[in-house]
Amino acid sequence: MSNIALFDMDGTITPARKKIDKKMIKALEALSDYGDIGIVSGSDFRLISEQIVSQIKSRKLLSRITLFPCNGTQVYDYNYKQREYTKDYSASIFSEIGKDNYFKLYDFLLKQQRVIIEDNPDIIISGNFIEDRGSVINFCIPGRMSADDQRANFEYIDKMRRVREQVFIRLSTFFSMSELNLSASIGGKTSIDIYPTGWSKVYVLRHLPDYETITFVGDSCHAGGNDRDLFLAESVVENFLGIETSSTDETLDIIRCKLIPIFTQLS
């Protein structure tokens, strides 16, 4: 029986914007003896490579890991001979919604950023806050280049004032009024991901028709979270199990105490 264990990245197998540690690598190595592994992230390939691929020395393990950046709208497989990941699939938000709608969205986000900063002058901003990842637009209010202390500053403000939650509501209204077939989800600690409707992380299931058992572990499974749609896929997909985690330490326990026993039983 073929199995695959899918994982979110930030907050699930790595701390937010940090590199994977040795304990998690060892746990994934143990899990890879019983099935394949997939990393499904709203982040692009560059960030997944920095945080995960660069830290794994075992070519055997890398060959068992498929990367699904940008909610699974991109696919990268490891080429054992070339010793690198190559892109096998990619979707385009620009092509999907068209130039006019694309720039209409950008204009709205620019206006939102101005309102947010005017209403919250204590938010420290740094660098680009709109990032086109090919199939996902990432709106990062404090900026993609924020240092750890700047991110922590925003996380605290966001927790107290629900800044992203308010933007999420305004985005939903904008999509409806503008008749844009777009959706949004709150991702990580500082961002909102925007993508064509249906291109949430559940998109990854389009690439996995041959697996008999699929599991997914994510930390943002709450309403509006970018793991929620995939987490709930068990209601429509047979032999699927979604598991919520609260930290990388809990993910380690999930791998050892749940996933490996499940896959062992199935193999």
Image (tube, helix red, strand yellow):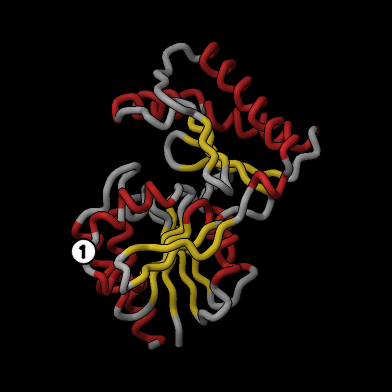
In this picture, residue 112 sits left or right of residue 262: right
Quadrant of the drawing holding the N terminus: bottom left
Q: Residue at x 69, y 44 (%)?
A: 182
The amino acid type of the residue labelled 1 equals Lys
Q: Specify the farthest residue to the front.
A: 82
Q: Which is nearer the eye, 56 or 84? A: 84
Q: Position of residue 88 (x, y in %)?
A: 50, 65
Relative to residue 176, is residue 52 depicted above or below?
below
In the displayed structure, 135 sits above or below 209; it is above
For the point 40% across and 29% down, which residue is it?
A: 155
Q: Is residue 26 left or right of residue 220?
A: left
Task: Decide: few, some or many residues near mark 1? Use Cα within 10 Å; few <14, some 14-19, many ≥20.
Answer: few
User: Residue at image x 57%, y 40%?
Assistant: 137
In the image, 184 versus 252, the foreground residue is 184
Where residue 18 appears, as percent x and y from the top left, is 29, 44
Q: Is residue 243 visible?
A: no
Q: Which residue matches tag 1?
A: 57
Q: Position of residue 92 (x, y in %)?
A: 62, 50
Above or below, 225 against 170 in this view is: below
**SS state under label 1:** loop
Quarter of the image containing the C terminus? Answer: bottom left
Residue 79 seen anywhere in this rendered image of the structure? yes
In terms of image quadrants, where is residue 3? bottom left
Q: Residue at x 30, y 57 (%)?
A: 53
| Number of numbered callouts drawn | 1
